[in-house]
Every structure is written in structure tokens, then in C-alpha cells.
Image (tube, helix red, strand yellow):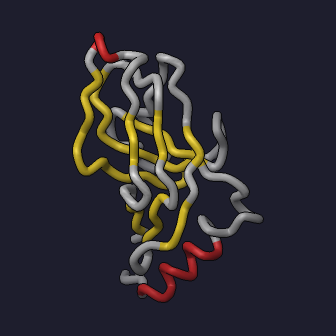
């Protein structure tokens, strides 16, 4: 089944960009594929999800509108990111693989931050 670019954009407008439905969105980081449920979300080292301000990207896609920075990264390899409707708990909405995995070494733990410039994160529907 194929979905048109028009319908993908309408789905994004009526869901992810709809502030009544989703007053806020939050970025999570993962050490494996989050799948459909947000699995493999990193925890520890005071890491917390950060606010994600979405904007329209290419047809059927959203981008992060602002520069974002995740701090207090725990040790390990970060391979994926996700978007949630709550800062803690909540519902996992969608996710994707990072363009380049990031390894956080033990000596970097708590001091390293991961920074995404505006437009660095691209999420596509379908």
C-alpha cells in the first residue's frame, strides 16, 4: 500500500503538529531500535528527555525546529532517537536511526552532551 505525499502531510498536520492533540513533544535517545513501543531508551546519569519542537520538513516528514542538547549522557552506544508525548512515561510516537551512532565512554559519562542543530533530525511517515 502506498500513501501519497499529500496524505502524509495531512497526517502530520493533524497529529504531530497539532498542539491541541500534542501540546508538547520530547526527544528520547536509544541504544537499539525503539520499534513500535519505544524500547531500548537510555537511562541513567541523570539523562532526561528534552523538548522537541517539530516543524514540517519534506513531504511526509518533520524536522526539529530548534537546536537541542541532551546532557548527562550515560555510558554506551546511542543508535536511535524517538519522540514521545510526555517528558517521562507517556506514549512513544515514532523514532528513527541516528545518521551516526555515538559512543559514550566511561570517562565521558555525565560530562558529554549530544547536540542536534535545527533540522538535524528527520522523521518520515511511511
Rendered residue at 25%/28% (across/down): 103
At 48% from the left and 55% from the top, the residue drawn is 94
For residue 115, what is the image quadrant? Answer: top left
Q: Residue at x 72, y 57 (%)?
A: 23
Which residue does the image show at 57% across and 57% down from the upper left? 53
For the image, the number of numbered tags is 0
Which of the image's four quarters has the N terminus? bottom left
In the rendered view of the protein, which quadrant contains the C terminus? Answer: bottom left
- Rendered location of residue 84, percent (x, y): 58, 47
The image quadrant of residue 108 is: top left
- Closer to the camera in the image, 117 or 13: 117
Q: Classify 88 as above or below 100.
A: above
> Residue lying furthest top in this view?
107
Q: Is residue 124 left or right of residue 83?
A: left
Question: Is residue 32 or residue 49 the one in the foreground?
Answer: 49
Q: Looking at this view, is 92 or 117 the one in front?
A: 117
Name the spot of residue 6 as percent of width and height, x first: 48, 88
Q: Is the residue 45 above or below the residue 123 in the image?
A: above
Q: Is residue 116 above or below residue 6?
A: above
Residue 14: x and y in percent read 64, 75
Where residue 75 appears, as percent x and y from the top left, is 33, 18
Amino acid at each position: 500500500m502506498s500513501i501519497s505525499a499529500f496524505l502524509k502531510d495531512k497526517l502530520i498536520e493533524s497529529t504531530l503538529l497539532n498542539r491541541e492533540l500534542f501540546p508538547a513533544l520530547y526527544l528520547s535517545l536509544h541504544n537499539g531500535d525503539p520499534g513500535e513501543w519505544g524500547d531500548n531508551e537510555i537511562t541513567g546519569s541523570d539523562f532526561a528527555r528534552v523538548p522537541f519542537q517539530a516543524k514540517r520538513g519534506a513531504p511526509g516528514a518533520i524536522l526539529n525546529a530548534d537546536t537541542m542538547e541532551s546532557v548527562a549522557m550515560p555510558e554506551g552506544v546511542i543508535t536511535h532517537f524517538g519522540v514521545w508525548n510526555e517528558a517521562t512515561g507517556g506514549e512513544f510516537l515514532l523514532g528513527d536511526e541516528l545518521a551516526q551512532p555515538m559512543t559514550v565512554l566511561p570517562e565521558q559519562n555525565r560530562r558529554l552532551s549530544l547536540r542536534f542543530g535545527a533540522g538535524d533530525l528527520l522523521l518520515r511517515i511511511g
